[in-house]
Image (cartoon, rainbow, N blue to C red):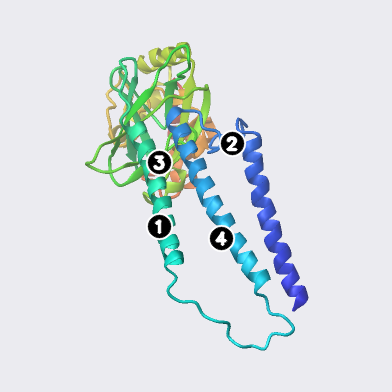
Amino acid sequence: MQLRGSNQWHFLGSQILVCVCCTAAAFADPASPFSPTNIFAPASTPAKSIFGLSLFVLAVTGAIFLVVFTLLLYSVVKFRKRKNDDGREPPQVYGSNQVELAWTVIPVLIVVALFMATARVIASVQKTARPDNAIEVVAIGHQFWWEYRYPGLGVVTANELHVPVSDDNQSSPTFIKLFSADTDHSFWIPRLAGKTDLIPNHPNSMWIDPHEAGIYLGQCAQYCGTQHAKMLLRVYVQPRADFDRWIQEQRQPATVSAASQGQRIFETTACINCHTVAGTVANGRFGPDLTHLMSRDTIAAGAAKNTPENLRQWILNPDTIKPGSLMPAMQLSGQDLEALTTYLETLR
């Protein structure tokens, strides 16, 4: 029995050590490229406000834990069973007004303080006025991918959101309107902002002002169906000049090359019912806009890298990459599959 108990204590100790090490590592290297979702490294004003609130809540709850643990440890040591214990029940104390008042008033004050701090942060984030130079993006959640529209800039893309960096030299916040095309989704980029739900027929909004250029990863945080776990977010924060260049490139129609056979297949199969390619007759709205497909690093909402091999497999049978996705398997012949893939590779 002693050995078994000892093993349990060793196991518990090892788990605590792992948690402590992971937390320390997160604080020690907040800008690590291997942690693009690190909640301990906020890179936007809303995320910093939430992070500050979380530290305050952690401090309050940590103080409560220390007080309770200290009292518990004191009670265990002070009133432990002694050798001369006769086994009689100790005197019972009832009706202490001081104790009852303390454990009623103190928790109420703690809850009020936490509520007020939380309400202040929520109000400061949600009631921020939109400046004239803000970028407007409309994000639409689909099963299981993201659609991004830039109404003032004439750009439509999918899965990979591009925004300008907002630094001290040039503040350029991005205000995002959130819609859902089907079921509930949740838009969450941990280093840039908190979770905000996308609810059918109920528009929501949020904003970000990333202070550092780079790639920030996120996730749909609301279960929305089979492939909820692979409904990923990629936010590309770029210097203003690079962002403007990207906008200009995305405004251009699709580049048509010698892959006419592949384009004919695209326009005479079910592809045209779901996808849009600017400058062609394809104007579907159920799937991602493919006008500049090859300018994206990933396909299937981040489930796979955008390579010819993955693209070919995605067209042939999407379930091999994303089981349960709503894109149908095209069942093309080898020659037609190769021609269609070649055509899609020209969409840059």
Dots 2 and 3: beta carbons under 8 Å? no
Q: For numbered disc 1, what is the local secondary structure? A: helix
Dots 1 and 3: beta carbons under 8 Å? no
The mark nearer the N terminus, 2 or 4, is 2
Q: Position of residue 317 (x, y in %)?
A: 45, 44
Distance of label 2 from label 3 (alpha carbons): 28 Å
Residue at label 4?
A: 68
Residue at label 2?
A: 35
The mark nearer the N terminus, 2 or 1, is 2
Q: Position of residue 223 (x, y in %)?
A: 39, 50
Which-is-in-front pick, marks 1 and 3?
Answer: 1
* Mark 2 crowd level (few <14, some 14–19, many ≥20, 10 Å Cα): some
Q: Amino acid at mark 1?
A: Val
Q: Amino acid at mark 4?
A: Val
Query: Residue at position x 46%, y 47% from top?
Result: 229
Q: Amino acid at mark 2?
A: Ser
Residue at label 1?
A: 105
